[in-house]
Amino acid sequence: MTILVERFPGYRRITLNRPERLNALTVEMAAALNTALDEAEADKSCRALLLTGAGRGFCAGQDLAAIVDAAPADLGNLLEHYHPLILKIRALPIPVVCAVNGVAAGAGANLALACDIVLAARSASFVQAFARIGLIPDCGGTWFLPRLIGTARARALAMLAEPLPAETAAEWGLIWNMVEDERLMDEAQALAARLAAQASTSLALTKRALDMAGSNTLDHQLDLERELQLEAGKSPDHAEGVRAFLGKRAPVFARTRS
Ligand code: LHQ
């Protein structure tokens, strides 16, 4: 199985599982990942996702053996399998934590950057490997990189295709944080469990607002915040959060998404 799905209380862990190829992507794998994301969304008790890779790599991007003789049109067709995954991760109404356990290259790097909170092991690295094989960053690379780290660094990473160590990725703000290798999975699971215990409507709407900010004027964004705040304000979790604060106790949020 190219994708493994494990259920934990409140969240699911999805593991890219072609370790002998550093979890390089294939069309079959993209289809399996798509199904895993759909199933997680349909399960209202699933309130967070954790994405990681099996073995020593996170994901080496497209499986190059599968495109060695590909015609240009084939490359475009392949992206029709990958690009919807990027949009799906962004549109999911639940937070997605990515535990980057090793090298994340090409589409693999950008798959990680599409997630909401990226935690990487010290030994991990991020490589926009595309220029090495005469391609351009896809799967959102040209969109994510300048927004996350600014155009100067984005351009150099995309054009030089040099590996960026996890520690620098965290310093630059490409990712949320770096942890020692042996701590990665515990920390990532704790993060997923913590998000799963939070107010789910609040997280879903926060995710939506942050994504819309990429193309909105401040004026429009303030309107959107007002609209989404009204929606968040209607959730029982909001009432519970306020009561818990005033009662000096920990809030108990709903275990099922509405
Ligand atoms: C691989 C791969 C790989 C196959 C390692 N494929 N076998 C999407 C679709 C449409 C159009 C095109 O674009 C895209 C998006 C893309 O993702 S294009 C970019 C594709 N990815 C790359 O160019 C990265 C290629 N890989 C590497 O540069 C290195 O393997 C990295 C830097 C990831 C890791 O280096 P090392 O740690 O030194 O490992 P390694 O190179 O020895 O790899 C281990 C094995 O995995 C090895 O096989 P072997 O049989 O010798 O043990 C590699 O051949 C295999 N492998 N990446 N993408």
Image (cartoon, rainbow, N blue to C red):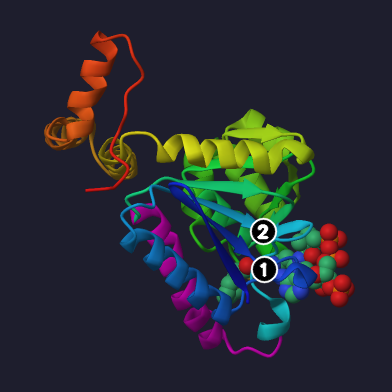
Q: CA distance from mark 1 to mark 2?
A: 6 Å
- Residue 63 found in image quarter: bottom right
Q: Is residue 34 shown above or below 238? A: below
Ligand 1, seen in the image, is in the quarter at bottom right
Q: Which residue is mark 2?
A: 53
User: Can residue 83 be spotted in the picture?
Assistant: no
**Dominant SS in magenta:** helix
User: Magenta region: which residues?
Assistant: 68-91
Q: What residue is shown with label 1?
A: 17
Q: Is residue 237 left or right of residue 171?
A: left
Give x and y (percent) for residue 160. Answer: 72, 52
Cβ of mark 1 under 8 A from ligand 1: no
Q: Are marks 1 and 2 in contact (CB under 8 Å)?
A: yes
Q: Residue at position x 75%, y 46% from top?
A: 124
- The front one of 160 and 109 is 109
Vertical relation: 190 (above or below) 10: above
